[in-house]
Amino acid sequence: MSDSQVEKVPRTNSNDFNPIWADERVWFLSDRNGPVTLFSYDPKTKKVAQAIPNTGLDFKSASAGPGGIVYEQFGSLNLFDIKSGKTKPVPIAVTGDFPKCASVSSRQDSG
């Protein structure tokens, strides 16, 4: 960052998107091995590595937080732990906050 140098992530015939800087690496989504999945690029070693195997549907988005990357795949959220390299589902519970429906009566005046 100090010299504003640009470094390109090595790629051949792939779609790379959604870059994230975490744990001194650039994490990104790519279709370079088939379905879109999570990859990392280490600027020190100049190596790209697939972080999560994916034989299913494409990953659609990813976002980093402390120690992990949350990604979305076919409507489910999953958390990739950067240190362990393991993934676990993110449980989501949705509860309604709806008032009970009161019976409504309608009256027509005839006149």
Image (cartoon, rainbow, N blue to C red):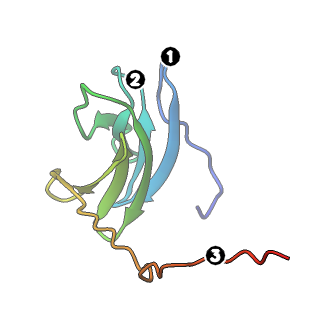
Please name the residue shown 50% across and 48% down the image.
19
Under tag 2, what secondary structure?
Answer: loop
Compared with residue 26, is residue 35 higher up or lower down, i.e. above or below? Answer: above
Instruction: Look at mark 2 in the image and give the residue it sits on.
Output: 32
Q: Nearer the viewer, residue 94 or 68?
A: 94
From what the image shows, is residue 10 above or below residue 69? above
Amino acid carrying mark 2 in the image: Arg
x then y, percent, for residue 84: 13, 56
Work out whether mark 3 precedes mark 2 in sequence or the reverse, and give the earlier one. Answer: 2
The one nearer the camera, 32 or 6, is: 32
- Badge 2, how many Cα within 10 Å: few under 14, some, many 20+? some
* Mark 3 touches mark 1? (CB < 8 Å): no
- Specify the amino acid type for callout 3: Ser
Tell me the distance, in whole angstroms, between the alpha carbons under discs 2 and 1. Answer: 7 Å
* Residue 45 horizontal/vertical position (percent): 33, 42
Q: Which residue is mark 1?
A: 13
Q: Residues within 10 Å of mark 3 (few under 14, many from 20)?
A: few
Residue name at image x 86 percent, y 77 percent: 111
Q: Position of residue 24 (x, y in %)?
A: 37, 58
Identify residue type, mark 1: Asn
In the rendered image, the quadrant that contains the N terminus is bottom right
Q: Secondary structure at mark 1?
A: loop
Q: Image point 52% across, 39% down: which residue? A: 17
User: Disc 3 and disc 2: Cα gap in Å?
Assistant: 62 Å
Residue 23: name its quadrant.
bottom left
Dot 3 lies on which element?
A: loop
Q: In the drawing, does residue 4 fall left or right of residue 71? A: right
Asked if the residue under mark 1 is in contact with the one under mark 2, i.e. CB atoms within 8 Å, the reply is yes
Q: Which residue is mark 3?
A: 106
Q: With respect to residue 65, does 6 lie above or below?
A: above
Question: How far apart are the alpha carbons under marks 3 and 1?
Answer: 65 Å
